[in-house]
Image: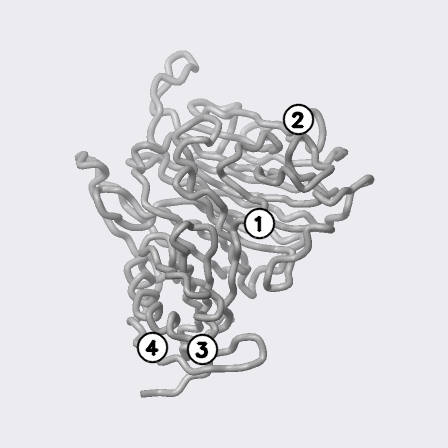
Amino acid sequence: MKETVIHYSVFGLFLFAVMAMHTSGMHTNSTVINNSSVIHTFNLPAGMPTPATIINIGSSLAPRVMQLSQFKTLAKGVAYHINSYASFGYTWGPNVTSIERIIFFSPDNNSYIVTDIYTSNDVVQDIYFINATKLGISASVYSDNWGGYQAQYCSGTFLGICTGVSSVGKAYGNIQISSSISAPSGATSSCCLIGEWTGVASSENGTKNLTQGGIFVKFDNLGYWSWGTPWAFFTEYFPTQTTAHVIQPPSWFTGLGQTVSMTTEPLANCPNGTDNWYEVWSSGGSSTSQGIGCRSTSSITWSEYELESPAGCSGRGGNYNGFCQLPQFSSVGFTGNICPATSGTCRNINSNSNPILSQYIQHNNQDTSTSSISSGGNSWTESWLSSS
């Protein structure tokens, strides 16, 4: 049995783990959605192990991680657990040491412990605790402080009018990170928080079956996340999950000015005929994936691409309309695409071209301005106006 070093803060321990074989390249799986005759093909990003492999690696490591003294200290006697379809993630790419991520959830889902483990040598890179009740980011409160677009995939049109809607199988696009962020004039203790993300839902306003993932940035008086950076990746599963799950960004993520491709999509089977949804972040050939949960693809008819001041920030004082302020930021760009769940071609989110339906959303009177989607294309910009 080999000896391995576990790094946590300034000291180390030992972890012995049986690793599953890794796979790479493009993989496809097929499954019947909701007992229908339509076959759904899952296309994995290049270099990503199959979800089954990621689950096997994480499941073999989890019991050993839970025996670590650091884990026990963070758990404080609480029986944390894993969810095969939401706990596991994976980071890979050129010049990136592959990392398996495991999220351990508390029974009430109000806290979680995240462990990142190098798969090449079984070394634990990080173990950290998140108290979700103190994040100020909650899916249980609907935010109207956002800008972007929601779209449906129309299955047919008549005289330019959508005559049917197909289930959505993927929402993806290139999301630009602001090249500069600063406190706006009159910033208060509620300043500042930004979320940029892709997601899918079964309702127009995202309050039903919202499945999403993206990037958060904390700024000014809110302080940094537990690992000492203003940036975080996150996933969210509404309504059964009441808070966003934030995770430490990988080494390939540099932040300001970077463009990241974000994809919300099902990549494997779940029990009872549902599909396992993942969020995948990619830039420069490197990627990070994270399981979100099981959801019936047939229930998903909306895709979303948003920049927002997330909900759940009320009570911090001095905030705008009950939500967190946005910091001042340079204009950012979005490029959105939508794919059907069953068959058909992925399309640009283009309000000027049938059969795409788009809905424009803007912050209340201030904060941001969302441009129109470019004619014949699928790109738009988000510009900062003011906060008070």
Identify the coloring. Answer: one colour
Left or right, 275 with reference to 204: left
Q: Position of residue 10 (x, y in %)?
A: 58, 79
Give the secondary structure at mark 3.
loop
Give the secondary structure at mark 1.
loop
Sequence order check, earlier mark of 2 and 3: 3
Q: Residue at x 35, y 68 (%)?
A: 62
Q: 158 above or below 51?
A: above
Q: Position of residue 16 (x, y in %)?
A: 35, 80
Q: Are the residues flagged by discs 1 and 2 in contact, CB closer than 8 Å?
A: no
Residue type highlighted by circle 1: Leu
Q: Are the residues flagged by discs 1 and 3 in contact, CB closer than 8 Å?
A: no
Task: Using the image, tell me which numbered label, if any, was put on residue 17.
Answer: 4
What residue is shown with label 3?
Answer: 123
Q: CA distance from mark 1 to mark 2?
A: 23 Å
What residue is shown with label 2?
Answer: 364
Q: 283 above or below 277?
A: below
- Near mark 1 (Cα within 10 A), the count class, few <14, some 14-19 or many ≥20, is some
Q: CA distance from mark 2 to mark 4?
A: 52 Å
Q: Residue at x 44, y 73 (%)?
A: 118
Residue type highlighted by circle 4: Ala
Q: CA distance from mark 1 to mark 4?
A: 32 Å
Q: Are the residues flagged by discs 1 and 4 in contact, CB closer than 8 Å?
A: no
Q: Residue at x 41, y 56 (%)?
A: 106
What residue is shown with label 1?
Answer: 135
Left or right, 8 with reference to 98: right
- Near mark 4 (Cα within 10 A), the count class, few <14, some 14-19 or many ≥20, is many
